[in-house]
Amino acid sequence: MFNHASPKAMALLSFILSLGSPNTPAAGQTTLRPATEFSATLDRFADRPFHSDIAFFETIFSHRAIEDDRLPFLLANAYILTSQHQVGMAFFEHVLQSRRATLSDRALSTHLAAYALIRADYAVEVNLFSRLGWVSQTFELLEEADDLADGQNPLVHWAAGVIYAQVPGFFGKRDEATHHLTWLAERPETEPLPGFYREAYRHLGQLADRRGDRAEASRFHALSGYGADAPDTLYSGWFATSAELGLRMSPTPWIETIAPDEIYAVRGHGFSDIHFVISTDRSQLIAIDAGTQPFSFESALAHLEQTVPDLPPLRAVLVTHAHWDHIGGYTWVRANRPEVEFYGRENYAGTLQRAQRTHPYEQLRSEHYEHAWISDYSPDHPVSDITEIELGGSQFRLVPVTGGETEDALLVRHEDSGTVFGGDTLMPFYGEPTVDEGFVREAISMMDATLALNPSRLLHGHYGITVLYGDRNTLAAYRDAHAWLVESAGPLFETGHAAEEIIRMNLTPPSLLDHPDAFLGYLSARDHIIRRLGDDYTGIWREDSSGLEPRGLDTITRTDRGRALELYFGLSASQTARAIEAMLENGDLELALETAVAAEDRFPNNPRLAALRQTAADRLRGLVQFFDPFRFTIYTQLAEREHPPMPEDSRSGP
């Protein structure tokens, strides 16, 4: 029946069939699937909510020993927040059984601690007569983990401290909780990423409250940043968001010395980082980008001036692209440092126009945001070709590219050190998610251009991007995975698959297994690349492969869904609330949130439905707290909460 099929159609058929079968060696026409030895474990939980991160991690963990401390904790966090404890425990048990001999002691201790977190959170579901033994076995796992790491793994201290601080007092673990959490508080330089020790400070504050030590409690509650408004969900990610300050990629202001007396990264004063370079003759300070808001650039510059003695005056700003969070300090610089000259791309106008879109989420840019901060932006020195400039004896090479995000991207190479400043060329969202931009195909040549600059180090416009793509070898591996994904997803769109369907295929290049340093970079960007590609293939109507779920044909809103709940499904507000509670218990968080929003529209001013909407949004922001600052901000507002920044003295090093 396939005699007349084109080679392209046959290749597509081969690829689609491979999605449900064991891996084959044909590069570009297969995707990595969970290892066969894990099939029985995972098949026991076939009817569960789909979560992209969990699908990816399960696949990777099933194929190789994982030495990266971050991955077990990210997977445990996802299992807990989606109520997939039973899956998580079974999966971790299988991993520990099959990988114990090949994991280093350090990695094994992290796996045990992550497994203990899932068990501890599940303890309330255990039969009362078995619960004491269950909890005791969880304690034994933590003790084994601590012994394996010789008491030096901060993730083990974190897990043990958080768990011991929350068990009932009759277990006698409060002193041990204080010991583990104090170990962290006394060593802020061991913090794996900014914001991870929020929970340590929060629980130290609660332990001090129980002891009646009000001064100590107040100190630790302040360090957590929460004050009296601590969330119900565990938060250990690096985002902070508030109406007053907007979104921040780092929860506390801090300065990282990249090269002493030469290059500094100033973080946490806004959504974007600002990098500063002291010229060779020490006559000039050069900024890479102008920050998120006027007040954020002003505070970042003041922070650097207070930290670095004899800092020369600011003389130039090199703009990597004209997004609002990279030129937000433009008007402040013009008003307060009129002698400063701006360098930027000549084709900035389109990016600048898109950046002036108005958002309903005030915690994204801050409630004080004004388009006037950026509307008059114009570089003094427009750059259209590769340009060499000299500033105070320092040589810079300015390389125009069509970046992953925008058409006006500018790579900046500091020739003296070999440092390349990439701006947002590798922002995993490939443009602001609510704006029609992003260049996922062109990003391949952009990465080639970046690698051709032979960077000694890569510094991006946000700390998280630098963590993911700050090493040239990691970038090279990610570049190949990115190209594989573009090549693999394109034919699926051509045959009418929707982005949501393709995301659920868990597309993962088999070659990625050889590059564990690129795992998180690929996962962070994968779903966004697929959605951006979808924009290239679809019009105002969007089909799916079944033809049963077209998008754009109707005008259904939350009001219509709310009417359906009462008029057609016959549900009262209480019955709808019970259904939403069941969704939350099963981990269907997105479905729960959408249903709660529709129910509130139909049954307004219902506190139970409002609380369920807030719970669903709170858990969703916990799920995305490591990867997606935009969704984190939106969910935070839907939860009617803020996630305030931490004080500067909560962190002393990167």
Image (spheres, rainbow, N blue to C red):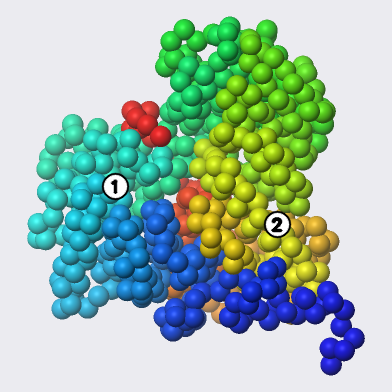
477 relative to 381, above or below: below
Residue 96, position in %: x, y?
Answer: 33, 70
Which amino acid, mark 1? Pro
Q: Nearer the viewer, residue 653 or 22?
A: 22
User: Nearer the viewer's eye, disc 2 or disc 1?
Assistant: 2
- Residue sitting at x 35%, y 65%: 102
Residue at numbered disc 1: 154
Residue 473, position in %: x, y?
Answer: 57, 46
Residue at numbered disc 2: 483
Circles 2 and 1, Cβ within 8 Å, touching? The answer is no
Q: Which mark is residue 518?
A: none
Q: Is residue 372 visible?
A: no
- Residue sitting at x 78%, y 28%: 386
Q: Which residue lies most toward the bottom here?
A: 1
Residue 534, position in %: x, y?
Answer: 75, 61
Q: Nearer the viewer, residue 125 or 13?
A: 13
Residue 31, position in %: x, y?
Answer: 62, 71
- Residue sitting at x 60%, y 28%: 418
* Image-based side of 255 in relation to 358, left or right: left
Q: Quadrant of the N terminus?
A: bottom right
- In which quadrant of the rendered view does residue 45 lie? bottom left
Separation of disc 2 and disc 1 at Cα? 36 Å
Q: Is residue 137 visible?
A: yes
Q: Nearer the viewer, residue 372 or 599?
A: 372
